[in-house]
Image: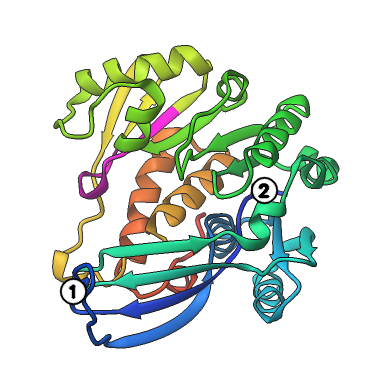
């Protein structure tokens, strides 16, 4: 197994509008689409498209949406042996509104994702031990995420964590992460210091990331900077990675671009590539994904990483 994702699975409903409505306002949409989503599922599908052998530990409801998600995973060759089917709750759902600039507003109903617990993850211990990297995010219970990181660490498997959506984390989590991938807002909340309103140069980035490095003892940090690309903190060195060279007019939908970035980094690391090369490749793949509508639908335009 190259990449094992422990995370959420959702069924997505997209509404495309010229602009977002004001509070209390009703507007007419331009188009409605459905698709597959959830941070974990997006990352698993994207990693598979990029050529990795992928498994996922997740949970869906005992409903039509859950059946469709499982069939979708299998169509990409993803190992679903540890996707739990919850009997008493619905599959996770996401209502996504996208404006003409490709920006989005998202409301998520966790559903079955909230039932994924530490016991569910520990059942996948053998699969974790056979993986090259375990990728986690924060759309499932903290208990499940901690169990995945602990199990991977005990098996000598490298871990990668994106702390989104943000919350307060116990001290033990920090020492279980080998690679952090996060944006400025998430970094602010983790270190308790406001940086996201500032233009960060290499020196400033190094200064604000030192507390996280010291706290976690991690192998590397990737700080995503939106349209400005990313910064890689590798030991005492900071490397600025430029964004993909695309025109603003070609941006159709930014939904799922972050998951594309994370999946790409995980695949590159599983192949033995360095973190700088991984981030550079991830900027390129994310740049492709934003030129197409949908989350997983946009990944079909990517090519395997060699």
User: Magenta region: which residues?
Assistant: 221-230
Rendering coords of residue 90 (x, y %): 67, 69
Residue 139 included in the magenta stretch of the image: no
Residue 223 included in the magenta stretch of the image: yes
Q: Check contact, mark 2 vs mark 1: CB within 8 A.
A: no
Rendering coords of residue 293 (x, y %): 36, 75
Q: Eyeballing the image, is 68 above or below 261?
A: below
Residue 208 badge: none
Q: Is residue 148 left or right of residue 130?
A: left
User: Label 1: which residue?
Assistant: 19
Residue at (15%, 64%) from the top-left corner? Answer: 248
Residue at (52%, 21%) from the top-left corner? Answer: 218
Rendering coords of residue 303 (x, y %): 47, 65
Q: CA distance from mark 2 to mark 1?
A: 41 Å
Q: Eyeballing the image, is 221 above or below 45?
A: above
Residue 2 badge: 2
Residue at (65%, 41%) from the top-left corner? Answer: 134
Residue at (49%, 30%) from the top-left corner? Answer: 168
């Amino acid at each position: 197994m190259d990449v094992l994702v422990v995370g959420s699975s959702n069924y997505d409903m997209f509404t495309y509008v010229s602009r977002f409505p004001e509070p209390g306002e009703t507007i007419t949409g331009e188009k409605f689409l459905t698709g597959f989503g959830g941070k974990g599922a997006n990352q698993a599908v994207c990693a598979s498209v990029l050529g990795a052998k992928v498994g996922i530990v997740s949970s869906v409801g005992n409903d039509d949406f859950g059946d469709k998600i499982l069939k979708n995973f299998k169509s990409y060759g993803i190992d679903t042996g540890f996707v739990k089917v919850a009997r008493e709750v619905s599959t996770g759902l996401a209502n996504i509104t996208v404006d003409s600039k490709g920006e989005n507003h998202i409301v998520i109903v966790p559903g079955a994702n909230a039932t994924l617990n530490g016991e569910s993850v520990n059942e996948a211990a053998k699969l974790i031990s056979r993986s090259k990297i375990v990728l986690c995010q924060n759309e499932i219970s903290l208990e499940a995420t901690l169990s995945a990181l602990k199990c991977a660490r005990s098996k000598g498997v490298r871990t990668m964590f994106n702390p989104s959506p943000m919350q307060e984390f116990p001290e033990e989590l920090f020492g279980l992460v080998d690679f952090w991938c996060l944006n400025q807002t998430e970094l602010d909340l983790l270190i308790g210091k406001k940086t996201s309103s500032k233009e960060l140069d290499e020196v400033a980035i190094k200064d604000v990331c030192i507390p996280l490095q010291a706290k976690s003892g991690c192998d590397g940090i990737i700080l995503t900077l939106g349209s400005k690309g990313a910064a890689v903190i590798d030991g005492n060195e900071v490397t600025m990675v430029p964004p993909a060279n695309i025109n603003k007019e070609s941006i159709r939908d930014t939904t799922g671009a972050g998951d594309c970035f994370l999946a790409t980094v995980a695949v590159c690391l599983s192949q033995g590539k360095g973190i700088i090369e991984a981030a550079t490749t991830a900027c390129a793949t994310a740049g492709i994904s934003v030129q197409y509508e949908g989350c997983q639908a946009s990944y079909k335009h990517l090519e395997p990483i060699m």
